Image: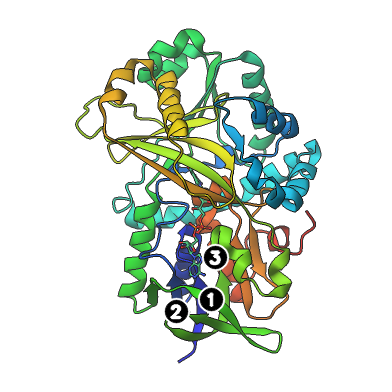
Amino acid sequence: MKADALIIGGGLIGITTAHRLAKRGCTVVLVEANVDVGLGANFANGAMLVPSQTMPWNSPGILSTLLRSLFTQNSAVRINPRAIPSLFKWGLHFLKNSRTHLHELHTRRLLELALFSMDVFEEYFKEYRDQFEAKKCGTIKIYRDQPSLEAQIRSNRHLSEIGLDWEALTPDQTVQAEPHLQALEPQLAGGIRFSADVVADSRKFCQTLRDDLVAAGQIIHVGCQANKLLMSGDRVIGARTKIGDIRAKNTILALGTNTRKLAAKDARSILVHPVKGYSVTYDTTSVNDLPSHPIIDEGRHVGVVPINGKLRVVGIAEFAGHDCTLNPKIVRQLDRLTKSVYPNLAQMIDGCKREPWTGFRPMTPDGLPYIGETSNKGLWVNTGHGHLGWTLATGSAELLADLIMDKPTALDASIYSITRSH
Ligand SMILES: Cc1cc2nc3c(=O)[nH]c(=O)nc-3n(C[C@H](O)[C@H](O)[C@H](O)COP(=O)(O)OP(=O)(O)OC[C@H]3O[C@@H](n4cnc5c(N)ncnc54)[C@H](O)[C@@H]3O)c2cc1C
């Protein structure tokens, strides 16, 4: 029997899309090339659901940051010269979108989607929070210089109108909120607490949804790469996969940075570029007294997050194509950054077993994801969530499910359409 929906890609976005469609009574088939779902860009990500971080990465001034990074060792942004030709078209649009008014507009739009996502996420939090270790602990952003702190406060004031929940902290209050930051107090200009942010394990979330779908009789094929879309005229009617042709009324592309490879001709206007990130997870399970809040060090572009009794540091934006090599210099750089946030934990960190990881953020030039139908009937996309895929997953999936079911959407979906101008 023909399924209502074939979802290609079992990352965070694909599995959440399958789950929202199944909740609406659809029959779904999901195919994932890897040996399980949730092993892609989310595998050891920052684990933070952060409406507080909805600023696209091309803030005004990004060009000078990128140029400086070419000549600076240990920069948080890195460009591999070999990747420059592949960046050309995407990069021009990325720079174009760094103009102040566009950056502000996209920040607001991302915040709206993030807040909507948090509403949808609440359903999962209530039902499954223990399965994916979700905690409503908020995040704390720290600032080492007054101008950056003040700039963030000014920007937050505008975002409060949309619903961003934040509170400025003096250095003393920052340390009260997270006592492990005590050694850093003399260097702090202050902090900002975002109480509505959440920490949760996105890989376990994917596994939870996988089990739920399978228990409900839905179909998931892992180790099953889709190689080609099946067409009937201009209409997409499924995909040719490793296990044969799978036909469905609707086909959804959720392949992260690989989406363009499989897209039908008309969906090739999708501009998603891999921006490589790193994390190192320190096995601190035998340590009793650990930080309890995720700390984002704004100036150093790094987050240090307590997750499942471990400590994870996450950061780096590297333009290196799909090269998945783990650069040991960057791993050491993340070690140093962790110790710069928690100098008092340096010895403990040196003694811990560590798991480095790297993944590709599927980044669009304007920072907004692509959610919607393509000009090929029956073909839909949900991709391009960049550094915010965990934050935006549930809302994006909800939005797409409503579009597919031809129901009114909670947000104006045309903002995320693939035909928007960049
Ligand atoms: C270092 C790092 C830290 C991050 N931290 C955070 C954070 O703290 N908070 C946050 O909100 N976001 C964070 N993100 C972003 C978030 O993890 C990503 O946006 C999100 O995981 C993207 O999910 P996806 O499903 O679109 O892509 P992917 O995870 O790449 O999933 C795509 C899937 O498609 C499969 N696939 C590809 N080709 C085929 C094919 N032909 N057939 C079948 N299957 C195929 C792949 O195997 C993969 O499983 C972080 C990302 C990184 C890299």
Quarter of the image for residue 271 reads: bottom right
Q: Position of residue 120 (x, y in %)?
A: 49, 56
Q: To which residue does mark 3 refer? A: 254
Mark 3, mark 1: which one is toward the viewer? Answer: 1
Relative to 289, is 1 on the left or the right? right
In the image, is 157 to the left or to the right of 285? Answer: right
Query: The N terminus is located in which quarter?
Result: bottom left
Secondary element at image label 1:
strand
Quick check: is the Cβ at mark 3 less than 8 Å away from ligand 1? yes
Say which amino acid is labelled 1.
Asn
**Quadrant position of residue 380:** bottom right
Tell me if 125 is positioned left or right of 85 in this view: left
Mark 2: amino acid: Lys
Element type at mark 3: loop
Q: Nearer the viewer, residue 113 or 14?
A: 14
> In the rendered structure, which disc, 1 or 2, sits on the residue that comes first in sequence?
1
Write down the residue under mark 1: 227
Rendered residue at 47%/40% (across/down):
278
Q: Position of residue 58 (x, y in %)?
A: 70, 39
Seen from this angle, which residue lies furthest left? 286
> Which label sits on residue 318?
none
Beta carbon at label 1 within 8 Å of ligand 1: yes
Nearer the N terminus, badge 2 or badge 3?
Answer: 2
| Most distant residue in the top direction | 186
Residue at point 37% right, 53% down?
Answer: 203
Given contact means CB atoms under 8 Å apart, are the residues at marks 1 and 2 in contact?
A: yes
The answer to whether 354 is drawn above or below residue 290 in the figure is below
Q: What kind of residue is marked 3?
A: Ala
Specify the label residue 242 is tagged with: 2
Mark 2 burial class by Cα count in 10 Å: few <14, some 14-19, many 20+: some
